[in-house]
Image (tube, helix red, strand yellow):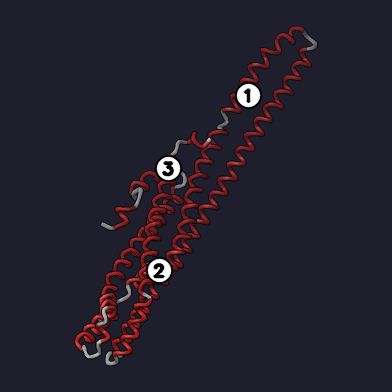
């Protein structure tokens, strides 16, 4: 089972079933697909980090020999040969991060795709917002129109009623049914329900857009961290290859290994920083997915 199958919340299959009847089906499916892709990228990177740590054990064994002073004994040819063998093994290993950033994951393309989806979400959100404003305006105008019409009608009937006692007595009986009928028409126009419906759709898009925006920023940071760590691994491999080529020169090997040892703490910090940021991305992805689903499932009248 993939790690994303264990960590992703809510599950992709359940989400798709829920939004099939949504008025924003296409955009919301795109959002959840993008968040699933982001989760899969995190999983690939974690596997790459794990493999990088595993490969680095060869270098750590050599560094331990150096720290114990075994490489200082030039006459110990057997130790020197063992070190060269470890370095040769490490140099032959491929960089686990190269397979990811040069093949499976293209951070530049992902940035463009997420940016395009963000644009679609915000554009649709603006259109719905304009419809919501227009509906509110239309509803307000209808109410004012009702009041004005009622006032004009009242004045007209009162003017006519002033010429007749019968008309004066009958005016309330005429006005009341008319006013009640007009009130029912205004209330029954569906204005409030439509406003709430549009607001409900807008909230879904708004939360989804915020999630994609966070994905963009997070993966821009992850991309920089991965590139930096990838370059550091390549640098270590180049040093290992140089040591193997100059294996007869004990001094060259020792100086090269001292360079690796000097940057060892920084390298471990880079691994931990990238790993921590990826786990934070997992949390961000799940939180965003839950918020969007919460907006989809929220009662329509809750947005009024």
Q: Nearer the viewer, residue 86 or 210?
A: 86
Query: Judging from the image, what secondary structure is the residue with disc 2 in?
Result: helix
Q: Secondary structure at mark 1?
A: helix
Few, some or many residues within 10 Å of mark 2 (<14, 14–19, 20+): many
User: What number is the disc on residue 226?
Assistant: 2
Marks 2/1: CA distance? 67 Å
Please tell me in which quadrant of the rendered image residue 171 appears: top right
Q: Residue at x 52, y 45 (%)?
A: 202
Quarter-of-image position of residue 66 = bottom left
Residue 303 lies, with reference to residue 275, above or below; the image says above
Q: Which residue is mark 3?
A: 294
Q: Nearer the viewer, mark 3 or mark 1?
A: 3
Residue designated by label 1: 182
Query: Where residue 156 is drawn, which disc sits there?
Result: none
Give the label, 3 or 2, closer to the camera: 2
Instruction: Work out whether mark 3 precedes mark 2 in sequence or the reverse, and give the earlier one.
Output: 2
Which quadrant: the N terminus?
bottom left
């Amino acid at each position: 089972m993939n790690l994303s199958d264990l960590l992703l919340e809510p599950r992709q299959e359940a989400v798709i079933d829920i939004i099939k009847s949504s008025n924003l089906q296409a955009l919301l499916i795109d959002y959840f697909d993008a968040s699933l892709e982001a989760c899969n990228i995190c999983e690939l990177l974690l596997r790459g980090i794990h493999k990088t740590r595993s490969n680095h054990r060869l270098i750590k064994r050599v560094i331990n020999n150096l720290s114990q002073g075994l490489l200082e004994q030039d006459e110990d040819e057997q130790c020197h040969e063992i070190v060269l063998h470890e370095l040769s093994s490490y140099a032959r290993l491929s960089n686990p991060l190269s397979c990811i950033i040069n093949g499976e994951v293209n951070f530049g393309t992902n940035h463009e795709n997420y940016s395009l989806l963000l644009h679609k979400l915000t554009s649709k959100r603006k259109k719905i917002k304009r419809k919501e404003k227009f509906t509110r305006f239309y509803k307000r105008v209808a109410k004012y129109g009702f009041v004005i019409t009622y006032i004009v009608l009242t004045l007209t009937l009162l003017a006519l009623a002033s010429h007749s006692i019968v008309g004066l007595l009958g005016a309330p009986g005429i006005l009341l049914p008319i006013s009640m009928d007009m009130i029912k028409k205004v209330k029954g126009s569906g204005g409030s329900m439509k406003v709430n419906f549009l607001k409900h759709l807008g909230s879904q898009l708004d939360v989804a857009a915020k999630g994609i925006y966070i994905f963009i920023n997070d993966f821009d940071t992850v991309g920089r961290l991965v590139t930096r760590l990838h370059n550091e691994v390549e640098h270590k491999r180049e040093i290992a290859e140089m040591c193997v080529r100059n294996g007869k020169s004990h001094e060259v090997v020792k100086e090269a290994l001292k360079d690796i040892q000097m940057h060892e703490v920084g390298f471990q910090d880079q691994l931990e920083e990238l790993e921590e940021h990826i786990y934070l991305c997992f949390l961000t992805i799940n939180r965003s997915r839950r918020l969007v689903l919460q907006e989809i499932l929220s009662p329509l009248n809750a947005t009024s």
